[in-house]
Amino acid sequence: MSNILIKDGLLVESDRSWHADLLIEGEKISRIAPSIKERELPGDTEVIHAEGLCVLPGLIDAHTHYHLESRNTVTADGFAEGSKLATFGGVTTVIDFADHDKHKPLGQSAKLRIDAMGAKMAIDYAIHQGVYQVGDNLISELTQLKAIGVSAIKIFTTYKNVGYYIESGSLRQLFQACKKLEILVTAHCEDDDLLNAIARSYTGGYEAANHADLRPAEAEYKAIMTLGQLAKEVGIPLYIVHVSSSRGMEAIRQLRSENVAVYAETTCHYLLLDKTKLKGDKGPLFVMTPPLRSREDNLVLQDAMVARELQVVASDHCSFTKEQKLAALDCRSILPGIPGTEEMLPLIHTFAVASGRMSVSQMVRLLSTGPARLFGLYPRKGSLKIGSDADIVLFDPEALWTLDGHNIHSAARYTAYEGFRVVGKAVMTYLRGRLVMGDDVYIGRPGDGHFIPMGISTAYM
Ligand SMILES: [Zn+2]
């Protein structure tokens, strides 16, 4: 593999941006200097002129569900499709989820997912392990899990009906074990008892628009507070996935004021889309859990993002085709989830950076460095440091385009942001020194993606 010299770009890290040249040797970044002369390098060095472009560390989508099997069907984007669409959004690493097969030790559940992904992923990946039950050999299972390179688990405070819910006694045990092993607990927060009480007394309809009434923001608040109190008692940090509401943010602020280390992720849809999308024929296309909230919720989350109260923006990419989404009209049986990995970069750039609310460095913090640090991938990922993996995105901050189902690469063939005018586009994406997307052409290869073992989360440092 020949060296690659990226000249005259604006290098962007989470805390600064500066003009410099960057040299890639093999799979790593080997040199950064104000000017690196071509004549000093071997003759076969490829030179990329990046004037006017930003040079970003590859983005990390910390929340994806590629190839998710659910209700006798499977998501439109499997590992190969997910890898492809990710490169168009400048994403070079995803953190996906392994289901917990209760008949197997946790490590084995993780291993199955890692192997399945390894065969088809064309970009790098790590894993969060779902934990839906606390077994007798908890410590040894978690130790094994960590040894494999999975040091983040995912729990649910809802979905008791499908067996995801852990009772509070077992949860305390789980938290204590995670503290001992420095495993980061990530949580989907909606209070199951409250949702059930609402469902029992509910007399309204069950169209897509009603989904928001059945799963109100209050359930998010309550679940975050309950988990937060337990985390406080046990003394562990907590990572809340896809915070969707102003009430959710209130709970996080309250816990932080009590010195609980709470880290928070949101997604583009909770920042930019509201529940009016759920009305009408296309409403089912916008059903996900938690549901879309009000415009006010969008604005509170945007402010929280700008004020650095959120550490990560991820996608919760879980894509189904229009046909799959529209197959059910009852909001309780519409397949939940939307595509989103590819849209993150242009959306956050447009609505937060180009609009003048935050710097391009803050964008890199939310989309790359933040997740890398919290999930123990830093500085191999999420960084433009000498010795870091040469996961590099050349990003044109001035490219104007419109998001629609035809120019987005999800096999779902639609985007929830149809018609959004955006500014900014990934023009070249490198994975460990190899071009995987350039000038709108995908050249990734299934199987080239590596599993990246997580180290210790900065939440424990
Ligand atoms: Zn999810």
Image (cartoon, rainbow, N blue to C red):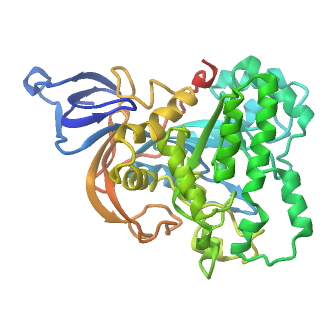
Estimate the x, y position of residue 123 in percent, counting from the top left: 46, 41
Give the residue drawn at x 24%, y 28%.
22
Q: Is residue 239 left or right of residue 122?
A: right
Give the residue drawn at x 10%, y 25%.
37
User: Between residues 156 and 201, which one lies in front from this camera angle?
Assistant: 201
Quadrant of the image containing the C terminus: top right
User: Between residues 395 and 302, which one lies in front from this camera angle?
Assistant: 302
User: Between residues 224 and 337, which one lies in front from this camera angle?
Assistant: 224
Estimate the x, y position of residue 76 in percent, counting from the top left: 58, 62
Task: Say if 315 sits above or below 419 in the image.
Answer: above
Give the residue drawn at x 74%, y 33%.
108
Residue 147 in sight from this viewpoint: yes
User: Between residues 84 and 368, which one lies in front from this camera angle?
Assistant: 368
Q: Is residue 33 left or right of residue 315?
A: left
Q: Dividing the picture into quarters, in which one does residue 199 lie? A: bottom right
Residue 105 in sight from this viewpoint: no
Estimate the x, y position of residue 180 in percent, counting from the top left: 76, 17
Task: Say if 154 sits above or below 78 in the image.
Answer: above
